[in-house]
Amino acid sequence: MHNTNGRRSWFARHKVLTGLGVFAALGIIGSAVTDDGEQTPAATPSTARPSATAPAAPAAEPEYDRKYVAALEAIDRDIVHGKPDKAQRRGENVCTALESATTRDAQIAAVELRFTSPDHPTGFGTAKAERILAVTVEHLCPERELITDDASSTPPADDPINAPNVDAPRVDIDRPRSCSHKWWC
């Protein structure tokens, strides 16, 4: 029903402000209650400011393997570049990439792709990448195997698919073949 004298209450005239006020009140009440349902006292100016004698809370230190980071810094300090947690994540990423790497070159490429710095935007080169790879496997993923050059280039003797065929005729690539069909040659 309408008020016949034309005057409505303040809350009825200011619906938006009333709604905002209700949400603000609920927010204040909700923040005063902790997770277990107990109410906490409101912060007073004396408890809100830390005292000069109270020790500051230690900052959360990022998680990383100190021996791994030290081994990387022994190769080149720019590998870690002052960010040990980032170097750790890059090493873990290399370990994941090693699951699908089938050649030594693929393993080295995984390292060069992931370990970069402002001074080395395309990686640290093959020699350092091999050392980074060895350190990473040693410290972060010892279950992975490093592929050696010998293992990737020479097929096993009992491999019938990749074994060299000694009975195959020798083909001289420099000598032109005679061919009766021009589209075939």
Image (spheres, rainbow, N blue to C red):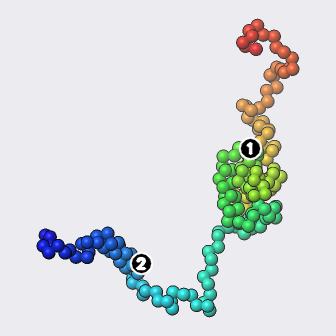
The answer to which quarter of the image holds residue 161 is top right
- For label 2, count other residues whose C-alpha is less than 10 Å away and answer few (under 14), some (14-19) or many (20+): few
The kind of secondary structure element at disc 2 is: helix
Give the image location of residue 56, x and y in percent: 61, 84
Give the image location of residue 135, x and y in percent: 76, 59
Residue toward you, 151 or 94? 94
Residue toward you, 14 or 32? 14
Q: Earlier in the sequence, mark 2 or mark 1?
A: 2
Give the image location of residue 91, x and y in percent: 70, 58
Q: Which residue is labeled 2 in the image?
A: 31
Q: Amino acid at mark 1?
A: Thr
Give the image location of residue 33, x and y in percent: 40, 80
- For label 1, count other residues whose C-alpha is less than 10 Å away and answer few (under 14), some (14-19) or many (20+): some
Q: CA distance from mark 2 to mark 1?
A: 57 Å
Which residue is at 78% across, 62% downward? 78
The answer to which quarter of the image holds residue 115 is bottom right
Dots 2, 1 in contact, CB < 8 A:
no
* Residue 36 in view of the camera: no
Q: Which residue is labeled 1 in the image?
A: 103
Which residue is at 19% across, 75% downward? 7
Q: Is residue 62 left or right of residue 24?
A: right
Which residue is at 72% across, 12% downward? 183
Residue toward you, 176 or 163? 176
Residue toward you, 138 or 182? 182
Q: Quadrant of the C terminus?
A: top right
Q: Amino acid at mark 2?
A: Ser
From the image, state whether disc 2 or disc 1 is nearer to you. 2
The answer to which quarter of the image holds residue 181 is top right
Q: Is residue 15 left or right of residue 179?
A: left
The kind of secondary structure element at disc 1 is: loop
Q: Quadrant of the N terminus?
A: bottom left
Which residue is at 46% across, 86% downward? 43
